[in-house]
Image (cartoon, rainbow, N blue to C red):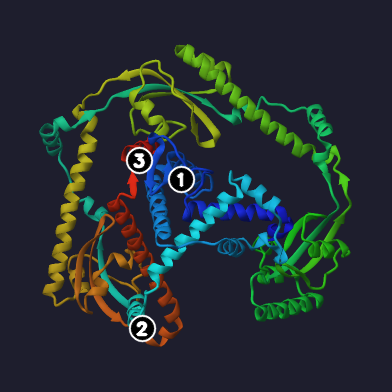
């Protein structure tokens, strides 16, 4: 939290950027200036049209790029997330269009209030930070003020439509009680687990069976085309050994950039923050009393770090006993700065009130403004120069290796040796095989499947910051597999099949024996050389030792006490069980959970109803011809992400 008030301008940038990400990725749909305001574009670039508004391919691409940049999902999952985000984009735009058709409008006052509510830091102490700061931050996101405020207005329309759909949503007391019972009812299970491993030893397969299976299914056993490879590996750790950064070079950089090593007046500070932002007055009064009590404890000799860890609302510093490190004059809010720089070393402040809340400060050390001498920064500067030099060497070496190997692939080993690169031969490999340095690498698979003899792959990133390129030295055509090549595979297939059948039969026999013994599962298990276990009392969301989630045993909460259940498959095992007892929920605890359960049910139903509501709007607009999706453009777009 301290980063918020360390610098007002910096805070505004971060917070507004966060809001833009939230709006752009989760709610509204206008990301590209001019792309979502009825903008034109060729038919090949228009993904969908809602009324006169168009969704362009570039708009979708930028939305997805922003999602990846902000780590909403990993880049290699793009093919799965892209269809969902495109669908969400079209649906939201359709709902906004319908809102306007129904006469909903968002006034300028509504827009200002929405921004004030979402980004209160734009209005410190009730005053606006100024149009220049506002516009500057938006420009970093390629947005103008009108465009951003248009986004906010559309979000307001979207929220109003959703609110209208949920106005009649009611959760009765009976709904709450039934959900409470479902969540808190417990059951006790008795069960016998028959793992495949115990049966595996009984599932023996003879050599004749393996040979007969091979002869009968010979056509299905093929050895795929394989390639012999030579891998050339660029390893930064190897190249780094030849990189030397002299002191003269470091000193020259230091002399040219002295201003970068100047520090202003600094104070090493730790603090305890009790947050009051957006709190009502009566709560602020309570927080102030708590802060005063903490101050008295510290003045009485209590451990500052311990109290900070237990009480501070600054998540970044509380784990360090409130320690903020050094802060420079001019980088914090005025009240905080005035106190920090007026205190003597080790001195404790009185309560300091800022827009964020009440602070208790202790200044641990002070330093005057100064130029850090070369000796003090030499190690850091040399490390940075060395890191940059290694990166440059890696890139130039990679470029040179790729160029020379492509010209003379038959001399790849000599080229690699000259450039101090690693060479690793691969005798035979086909698609799906793990490759040295790379493992099973999707970027390398197409090359491994289709490359011709002498062909060189594009560089592929590998773990440890390595870069790998492959050269095809030999191609081994696909051919029918010889018996010797696949007999081990066939043995395992036949053994697994036999073991599975034995396991299923053994589980059925156990269940029948338990029924014959009047439901005595434990006795039935003992008679067959097995062992029964009894679980603790568990809820539906609980876990049963050895089985996992209780939800994987649905009969445990569907059948009465004494009932047998199974056989169930749990992993590679079979399980036969019995409901020992069912324990109803304690209704005496309902009152404490009633409100939260009601709210959760309401939220769940809201999500379901909202999905139906928005889907209904979308279908109606499609029926009216107001929503048109260019399926060819959509297919091309998504195909690009799949590839």
Label 2 vs 3, first from the N-terminus? 2
- Is 71 on the left or on the right of 615, as rendered? right
SS at mark 1 in the image: loop
Q: Earlier in the sequence, mark 2 or mark 1?
A: 1
Image quarter in which the C terminus is found: top left
Q: Nearer the viewer, residue 151 or 569?
A: 151
| 642 to 412, vertically: above or below | below
> Is residue 532 in sight in this rendering?
no
**What's the CA distance linking mark 2 and mark 3?**
46 Å
Instruction: Give the Cα separation between the discs numbered 3 and 1.
Output: 19 Å
The answer to whether 9 is drawn above or below residue 305 in the figure is above
Q: Could you tell whether 41 is left or right of 374 in the image?
A: left
Quarter of image, res 474: top left
Q: Which residue is mark 3?
A: 634
Q: Position of residue 169 (x, y in %)?
A: 37, 74
How far across and down, in percent of the image, does residue 479 sit? 22, 23
The answer to the question of whether label 3 and label 1 lie on touching residues, with beta carbons closer than 8 A, is no
- The image quadrant that residue 584 belongs to is bottom left
Looking at the image, is mark 3 or mark 1 nearer the viewer?
1
Look at the numbered disc 2 and give the secondary structure of its residue: helix
Residue sitting at 16 percent across and 54 percent down? 502
Q: Residue at x 59, y 45 (%)?
A: 141
Q: Nearer the viewer, mark 2 or mark 3?
A: 3
Please, what secondary structure does the residue beneath circle 3 have? Answer: helix
- The residue at which mark 1 appears reads as 38
Question: Could you say where residue 323 lies in the image, as x and y percent from the top left?
Answer: 74, 61
Q: Which residue is mark 2?
A: 173
């Amino acid at each position: 939290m301290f980063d918020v008030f360390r610098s007002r301008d910096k805070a505004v940038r971060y917070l507004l950027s966060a809001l833009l990400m939230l709006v752009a990725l989760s709610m509204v749909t206008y990301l590209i200036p001019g792309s979502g305001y009825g903008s034109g574009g060729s038919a090949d670039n228009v993904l969908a049209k809602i009324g006169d508004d168009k969704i362009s391919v570039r708009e979708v691409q930028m939305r997805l790029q922003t999602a990846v940049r902000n780590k909403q999902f990993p880049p290699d999952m793009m093919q799965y997330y892209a269809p969902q985000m495109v669908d969400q984009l079209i649906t939201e735009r359709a709902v906004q269009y319908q809102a306007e058709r129904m006469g909903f409008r968002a006034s300028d006052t509504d827009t200002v209030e929405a921004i004030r509510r979402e980004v209160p830091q734009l209005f410190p102490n009730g005053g606006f930070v100024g149009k220049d700061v506002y516009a500057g931050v938006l420009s970093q996101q390629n947005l103008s003020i009108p465009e951003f405020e248009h986004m906010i207005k559309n979000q307001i329309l979207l929220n109003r439509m959703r609110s209208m759909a949920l106005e009649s949503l009611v959760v009765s007391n009976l709904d709450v009680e039934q959900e409470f019972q479902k969540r808190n009812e417990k059951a006790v299970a008795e069960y016998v687990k028959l793992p495949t491993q115990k049966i595996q030893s009984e599932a023996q397969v003879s050599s004749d069976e393996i040979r007969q299976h091979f002869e009968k299914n010979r056509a299905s056993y093929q050895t795929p085309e394989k390639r012999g490879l030579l891998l050339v590996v660029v390893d930064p750790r190897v190249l780094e050994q030849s990189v030397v950064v002299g002191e003269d070079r470091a000193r020259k950089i230091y002399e040219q950039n002295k201003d970068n090593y100047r520090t202003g007046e600094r104070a090493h500070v730790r603090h305890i923050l009790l947050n009051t932002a957006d709190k009502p007055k009566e709560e602020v009064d309570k927080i102030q009393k708590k802060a005063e009590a903490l101050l008295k404890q510290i003045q009485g000799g209590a451990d500052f770090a311990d109290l900070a860890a237990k009480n501070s609302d600054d998540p970044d510093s509380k784990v360090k006993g409130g320690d903020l490190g050094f802060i420079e004059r001019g980088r914090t809010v005025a009240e905080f700065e005035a106190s920090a720089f007026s205190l003597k070393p080790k001195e404790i402040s009185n309560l300091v009130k800022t827009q964020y809340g009440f602070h208790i400060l202790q200044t641990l050390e002070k330093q005057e403004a100064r130029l850090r001498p070369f000796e003090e920064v030499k190690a850091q500067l040399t490390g940075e120069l060395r890191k940059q030099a290694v990166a440059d060497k890696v890139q130039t070496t990679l470029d040179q290796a790729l160029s020379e190997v492509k010209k003379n692939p038959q001399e790849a080993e000599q080229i690699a040796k000259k450039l101090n690169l690693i060479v690793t031969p691969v005798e035979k490999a086909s698609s799906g095989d793990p490759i040295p340095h790379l493992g099973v690498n999707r970027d390398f698979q197409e090359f491994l499947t289709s490359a011709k003899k002498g062909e060189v792959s594009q560089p592929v990133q590998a773990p440890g910051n390595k870069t790998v390129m492959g050269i095809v030295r030999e191609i081994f055509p696909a051919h029918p597999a010889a018996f010797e090549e696949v007999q081990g595979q066939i043995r395992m297939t036949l053994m697994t099949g036999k073991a599975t059948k034995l396991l299923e039969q053994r589980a059925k026999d156990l269940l029948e024996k338990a029924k014959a013994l009047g439901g005595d599962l434990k006795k039935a298990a003992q008679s067959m050389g097995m062992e029964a276990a009894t679980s603790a009392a568990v809820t539906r969301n609980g876990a049963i030792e050895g089985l996992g989630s209780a939800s994987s045993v649905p009969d445990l909460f569907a059948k009465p006490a004494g009932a047998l259940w199974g056989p169930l498959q749990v992993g590679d095992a079979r399980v036969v069980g019995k409901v020992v007892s069912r324990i109803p929920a304690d209704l005496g605890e309902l009152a404490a959970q009633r409100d939260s359960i009601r709210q959760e049910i309401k939220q769940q139903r809201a999500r379901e109803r909202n999905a139906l509501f928005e889907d209904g709007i979308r279908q109606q607009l499609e029926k009216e011809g107001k929503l048109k999706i260019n399926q060819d453009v959509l297919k091309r777009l998504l195909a690009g992400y799949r590839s």
